[in-house]
Structure formats: C-alpha cells, structure tokens
Amino acid sequence: MSAYIIPIIFIAIFCYSKYKKVNTYDTFVRGAKKSIPLVVDIFPYIAAIMVAVALLRASGITALLANALSPVFNFLGVPTELIELVLLRPFTGSGSYALLNDVLVQYGADSYISRCACVILGCSETIFYVTTVYISQTKVKKLLYAIPIALVCATFGAVFACLLCKIM
C-alpha cells in the first residue's frame, strides 16, 4: 500500500488543480524559479554549518566529547558507540548518515546498536540546519528558548529510542 501513496497524492493534487482550473505545469515552473534565489540566500548559512561540523569531526572534538559524556549517556541507556551520532545529529544530516553507515558496517544491520542508531536518526532532526534555513528566511532572529528545548527533546528522543529498541 505504501508504494501507492506518492502516486495517489500526485494524482489527487493534479485532479484538484484541474478542478480549480489552475495550470499545474506553469505553477510548478514559477515555484521552481522562486527556489533559485532561496538557495542562493541560504547557501552561506548551510556552508557555515557544514564547515563547522567538518572541523569538529576532523579535530576529534566530537570523539573527545563523546568519551567525556559516555558515563551520562550510558546511565541513560544510550550505548557508547552512538554518543557521537547523538551529538552530531542536530548539526548535520549527511554526517549522521555517514556515522550510521559506519555503525551498520561494524555491527551489522540486525544488532541492537544498529537498530538504536536507525531509530535515533528516524526520530530526530538536524536542528541547527533547520534553524539556519528558518532564520535566513524570516525576520525572527531570537531563538533563546527554541534551540535549547529542541536539543533537550532530541536527547530524550535518543534515550527513548534506545529504550524502545531494548524492549522490542
């Protein structure tokens, strides 16, 4: 059934646009044209986040931080092997998937650690990436509470992901 959801949504939107007498192709092209300036506007923010993440990983700071925080995360039920993933996920999606790939190769797809890593990636978001895109396109610049709350929720999500994987 899930293989048919996207085509059904696509056909439904097409039929609705025909019903409303909207030229679907021209509307799509206009929207695509508007995306080019958006990409140009948000590129510096995304580049800054990606450079920062690459520097953190290359310098070994994330590994040191993961080792320092391992007692706390182990107490909360997050395996030591996944701490770096939990720390990097709010910053980068592609870096998180690279770490997931490393976990899957090292521990196998059916292991507890791999299942936890997959659930952590599935239930979390690249908080700083989304925030930079949001800030670059809105007038809202004060995120005093939003980022800390999102980080706490992401941490709780990782803890509950590991708990769920342990139970199931």
Image (tube, rainbow, N blue to C red):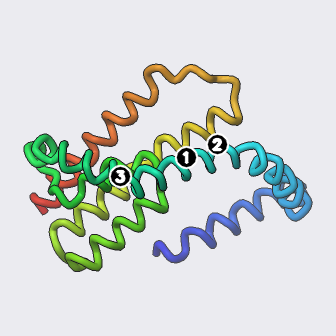
Going by the numbered disc 3, the residue's amino acid type is Cys
**Residue at label 1?**
49
Mark closest to the chain's N terminus, 2 or 3: 2
Residue count near mark 2 (Cα–Cα under 10 Å), binned few <14, some 14–19, many ≥20: some
Disc 2 and disc 3: Cα gap in Å? Answer: 24 Å
Residue count near mark 1 (Cα–Cα under 10 Å), binned few <14, some 14–19, many ≥20: some
Disc 3 secondary structure class: loop
Residue count near mark 3 (Cα–Cα under 10 Å), binned few <14, some 14–19, many ≥20: few
Q: Is residue 125 positioned above or below 140 on the image? A: below
Disc 1 secondary structure class: helix
Quadrant of image for the C terminus: bottom left
Percent x, y of residue 131: 55, 37
**Residue at label 3?**
123
On screen, residue 79 versus residue 33, left or right, reads: left
Disc 1 and disc 3: Cα gap in Å? Answer: 21 Å
Q: Residue furthest front?
A: 59
Disc 2 secondary structure class: helix
On screen, residue 36 versus residue 107, left or right, reads: right
Tag 2 near tag 1, CB within 8 Å: yes
Tag 1 near tag 3, CB within 8 Å: no
Residue at (16% x, 56% y) in the render: 80
Query: Count of labels shown?
Result: 3
**Residue at label 2?**
45
Percent x, y of residue 19: 83, 57
